Amino acid sequence: MNDDSPRRRGRPRAFDRDWALAVAMREFWQRGFEPVSVAELTAAIGITPPSLYAAFGDKKTLFREVVDRYQRTHGAFFAAALDAEPSARAGVARALRAAAVEYTSPGRPAGCLVISAAVNCTTGSADIVTLLREQRAANTTALRDRIEADVSAGTLPAGTDSAGLAALTGAVLQGMSQQARDGMNTTELLAVADAAMRAWPPGEAADG
């Protein structure tokens, strides 16, 4: 089985910052921001708390770095799918199908870290909740702008609800992430992705 998770080999001979980030990502992705303590993080990485603070600062700073890494790796599929297609409609179709695969990939936590990591956070983590909400909002805004450009170009019909379609896409992604965490498999999520695309008006470009 393909397993791209960090190997738990015990304490590394020398501190490997990239490896430590991969371990922290897995812990936050699997359990969320608040449930993972500093003691658990350092035990998983194989370092002492002072070493973690020296390398990353506090837990919140580490989490922000984890989110940045996630967005550049496992979470990059959505923007890549949009960029790979000539229209927003085809790009979203491709992205939702990619999400079905990514959210159920063997060897890593199910779903999306940016969607699930701040669920049920207390007021002490309000800045973390805001960070992830702003990440999601930025994606929705970028998609809305792409849809509006397609409407202007005639690729989508005049009067297309760009804000509504962008918000729908975000809601579908969030739902697919939770369904993956609840145990839905890739095939079932691909059916969700295909059903979601039926809400879109016909466009010049065929779905991916």
Image (cartoon, rainbow, N blue to C red):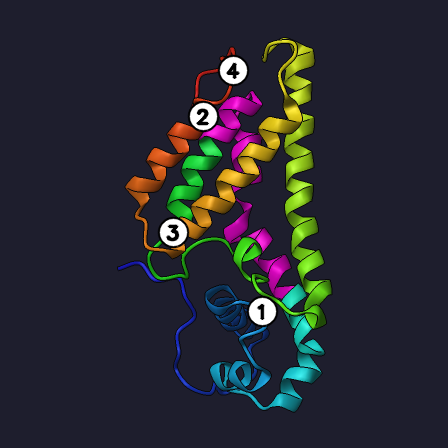
The numbered dot on residue 197 is: 2
Residue drawn where x is 39% and y is 42% of the image: 100
Residue under the image location 39 percent in, 74 percent down: 7
Mark-to-mark CA distance, 3 and 1: 19 Å
The relative height of residue 46 versus residue 7 in the rendered view (above or below) is: below
Q: Which numbered marker is on residue 201?
A: 4
Tell me the kind of residue under disc 3. Ala
Task: Name the quarter where the N terminus is drawn.
Answer: bottom left
Highlighted range, magenta: 65-93
Of the image marks 4 and 1, the number of the one nearer the N terminus? 1
Tell me the amino acid under the disc marked 1: Phe
Q: Residues within 10 Å of mark 4 (few under 14, many from 20)?
A: few
Q: Answer whether residue 128 is magenta in the image.
A: no
Which residue matches tag 1? 33
Magenta segment includes 91: yes
Q: Is residue 61 visible?
A: no
Q: Secondary structure at mark 1?
A: loop
Query: Residue 169 versus residue 142: which sits nearer the camera?
Result: 169
